[in-house]
Amino acid sequence: MPDPAYSPRRILFPCLVAACLAATMLSPPQALAASLRRSAIVKAVQSARPSVVNIHGQKTVPNEDDGRAFKQVRGMGTGIVIDERGYIITNYHVVEGVKRVQVSTAKGKTYIARLIAHDPPTDLAVIKIDADPALPLITIGTSNDLLTGEDVIAIGNAYGYEHTVTKGIISALHRTVEVGEGQEYSDLIQTDASINPGNSGGPLLNIDGNMIGINVAVRVGAQGIGFAVPIDRAMDVAARLIDVEVQKAASHGVSGQTLATATQSEFLITAVAAGSGADKAGLLPGDVITRVGSASVVRALDFERALLGKQGGEKVELAARRNGDPIHLDLVLSHPATADRSVSELAWDVLGMRLAPMPNAAFRRLRSQYRGGLKVIGVRPDSPAARQGIRYGDVLVGMHKWETVSMDNVAFVLESDVLDQEDAVKFYVLRGGETLFGRLQVSMRSR
């Protein structure tokens, strides 16, 4: 009869207990190690990566070895999804001159994109792909509270290596960078996160994974220096680029700006075009739009995204705040072009500028020799005004040989035959205490 001391059951049970104890002792450190590896940077990258796309294409450029010849080069860059229907923001130089822009998503799907519009002063552009299903959106932060020395992360198609991640800090703010003869970028974020050719158009993230900038430039000949457009500015530019008026689908008549702080963001109306749908709906400068239909609005981009796909004649419900009190309005979108267009619409269509009367007291503070002017509150991308570098905030004081104190003055210029007779019409604007001038190449076919 077997000795009970050597029972298999007696031997097996202590082994099982020991194994369980060992597992219990080893599991917590392993779990802790895995948790520590999934750092804030890892989480930030995992959150943003699905919204970052890679851009490829070929373009024709001059051959530096032979000034009379051209050559084909393969371009590359990065883009960021700003609307789930396939709208992507990137740098214009990434897609400029590229006949067939190829966009690859994080899931490996490739699409052909088309250019929607671009903004020369910031070198930003919006392209569109017909993606299905809906694309994930990146979390947009603010550049209003950036700190020199804080950690940042860049994601991009560096040298063609897709979704490359680099890390650094904010080295400085409000930089002006000259990137070529006669071309410079202003008010940029400087970072030492490695930004290489191909990173252009990609996101600059903070440690929370929020996009705080769009990488735009590399300083030629320098190492460890890159620059990005602050996100508050970039998103307002993106809003203008996807404006339904730019795409000539409809007209709303709203001009506004995003007011962003570290804790909140809101879309403030700064001007309403006379006779527009917004004017007829009862919107006023100073109103804060909070909702369009079922879409929440906290920035200018949200407002324009909510109107994508709408056509002239459609009605949309708006929620807003006026002096802190909630209001609800119905906005009927106008058709983009009608026979009885207002002066404001003509200026937008023909010149590419949205203009607003400037109060006498505000104009006098400019200490100008002129009697008055009209504030530029919008510039249509790819328009005569945009090509001449006219910016939001400029004050138009004259065209040809006439002053532009009122919208009636602009109407006189647009209705005269000078635009048909002249190859380009001279204009004068005030900016930062200086008078600047240029010549608008205007086609009057749209009058």
Image (spheres, rainbow, N blue to C red):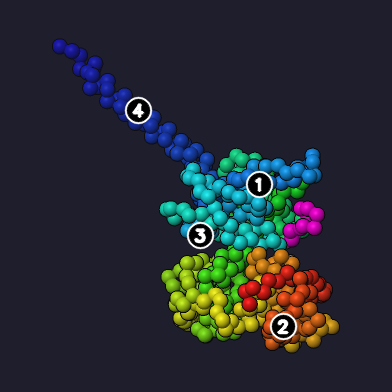
Q: Residue at x 64, y 58 (%)?
A: 124
Q: Residue at x 59, y 81 (%)?
A: 341
Q: Give the mark, 2 or 1, whose residue is nearer the N terminus.
A: 1
Point out the frontmost of discs 2 and 3.
Answer: 2
Q: Quarter of the image containing the C terminus?
A: bottom right
Point out the frontmost of discs 4 and 3.
Answer: 3
Q: Which residue is mark 3?
A: 83
Q: How many marks?
A: 4
Name the residue furthest front: 421
Q: Residue at x 60, y 64 (%)?
A: 241
Q: Amino acid at mark 2?
A: Ser
In this orientation, which residue lies closer to the viewer: 246 or 192? 246
Q: Give the mark, 4 or 3, whose residue is nearer the N terminus.
A: 4
Q: Which residues are magenta?
A: 178-186
Q: Which residue is mark 4?
A: 19
Q: Residue at x 71, y 42 (%)?
A: 71
